[in-house]
Amino acid sequence: MPEDKKRDPMPPPDVTPEEIGEFWDTHSLADYWDETEEVEIQVNLKSRHNHRCQFIVKLLINYTLL
């Protein structure tokens, strides 16, 4: 996005997941990259065959969905 063009503010943390989805359906993360921060989450999964799987996902996020 050109620097002289104003961008819409990102949705606040208290909006619904549907409202956040509607926002990102019409906006590009590339235009908001400077408002993100890296976070790390750990996920532990158990398969139907009792195999354990663990992985770490790194996300760029500026708010938490509850």
Image (cartoon, rainbow, N blue to C red):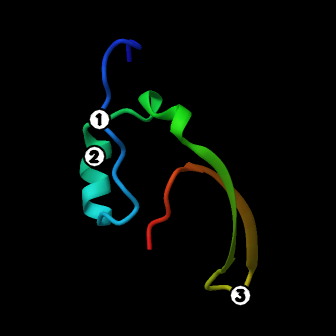
Q: In this view, does 10 lie above or below 29?
A: below
Above or below: residue 42 compared with residue 5: below
> Rounded to the nearest whole Å, what is the CA distance between mark 1 and mark 3?
47 Å
Q: How far, Cα to Cα, is label 3 from label 2?
A: 39 Å
Q: Where is residue 47 in the image (x, y as percent from the top left)?
A: 64, 81
- Please name the residue that numbered disc 3 is placed on: 50
Residue wearing tag 2: 23
Which residue has dot 1 on it? 8
Question: Residue 53 versus residue 37: which sits nearer the camera?
Answer: 37
Circles 1 and 3: CB atoms closer than 8 Å: no
Q: Which residue is drawn at 37% across and 32% down?
A: 28
Q: 37 left or right of 66?
A: right
Picture layout, residue 36 above or below residue 1: below
For the residues labelled 2 and 1, say whether their Cβ atoms are less than 8 Å apart: yes
* Residue type of the residue flagged with mark 3: Asn
Task: Kindly indicate the quadrant of the structure image that contains residue 25.
Answer: top left
Q: Nearer the viewer, mark 1 or mark 3?
A: 1
Whether pointer 3 and pointer 2 mark residues with C-beta atoms closer than 8 Å, the reply is no
Q: Is mark 2 on a helix, strand or loop?
A: helix
Residue 48 shown left or right of residue 51 in the figure: left
N-terminal-most mark, 2 or 1: 1
